[in-house]
């Protein structure tokens, strides 16, 4: 089950992602689906915002930012392919010594490990990008301050000296030397 949520930036009634969890879970259960995904642009300006995260209190429900939606679908597709491989291998090899519950538990653990590791990796990469961005912003601010000092101090000093310079004083000095 996939639902997408967005709102205008100038909207006065700002919604939260959590406002949509219950309905999304109800819709998923009604249609007997395994996963629920909320593709959301809501609450976009939070510092600790992760691009993909699981919803606490809801099993197999994730919130994803639009530009990471394809990544999450790829992860889920990989899980589905692995699930198909497990089922195929099970039928080919006629695994009779393992009970089906054990196979399903192993598969569920496998899925959660892949999703968890992928989300942690994406979050780490985003934190690195944030750190580099903050370094760039600090450098830009330092450059802007240097430009301001040059303009306010040095350029104004040169301008003042040029404006206060009088050729008449030089001419008087030359005239005194010649007399």
Image (cartoon, rainbow, N blue to C red):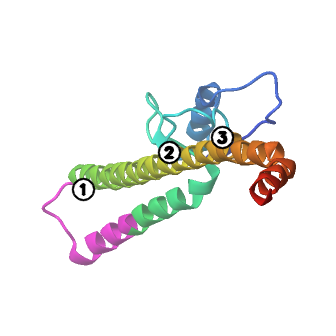
Query: Which one is nearer the viewer's eye here, 12 or 95?
Result: 12
Say if the magenta span includes residue 87: yes
Single out the residue that lies furthest toward the left: 97
Residue range (magenta): 82-99
Query: Which one is nearer the viewer's eye here, 148 or 77?
Result: 148
Residue to which mark 2 is pinned:
134
Single out the residue that lies furthest toward the front: 179
* Label 1, label 2: how far apart the Cα atoms are: 47 Å
Residue to which mark 3 is pinned:
153
Residue 2 spot, x, y in % from top left: 63, 47
- Disc 3 or 1, which lies upstream in sequence? 1
Judged by its main secondary structure, the magenta piece is helix
* Label 3 secondary element: helix
| Mark 2 surroundings within 10 Å by alpha-carbon count, few (fewer than 14), some (14 through 19), many (20 or more) | few
Residue 87 quadrant: bottom left
Residue 69 spot, x, y in % from top left: 58, 55
Single out the residue that lies furthest toward the right: 168
The answer to whether residue 116 is above or below residue 9 is below
Q: In this view, does 76 lie to the left or right of 112?
A: right
């Amino acid at each position: 089950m996939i639902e997408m949520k967005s709102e205008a930036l100038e909207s006065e009634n700002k919604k939260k992602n959590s406002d949509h969890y219950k309905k999304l879970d109800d819709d998923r259960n009604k249609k007997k689906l395994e996963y629920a995904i909320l593709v959301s642009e809501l609450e976009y300006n939070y510092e600790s915002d992760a691009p993909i995260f699981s919803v606490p209190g809801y099993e197999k429900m994730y919130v994803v930012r639009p530009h990471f939606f394809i990544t999450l679908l790829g992860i889920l597709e990989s899980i589905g392919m692995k699930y198909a491989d497990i089922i195929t291998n099970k039928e080919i090899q006629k695994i009779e010594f393992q009970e089906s519950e054990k196979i399903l538990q192993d598969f569920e653990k496998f899925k959660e490990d892949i999703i968890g590791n992928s989300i942690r990796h994406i979050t780490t990469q985003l934190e690195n990008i944030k750190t580099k961005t903050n370094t760039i912003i600090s450098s830009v601010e330092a450059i802007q301050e240097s430009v301001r000092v040059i303009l306010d101090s040095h350029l104004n000093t040169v301008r003042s000296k040029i404006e206060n310079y009088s050729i008449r004083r030089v001419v008087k000095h030359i005239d005194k030397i010649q007399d």
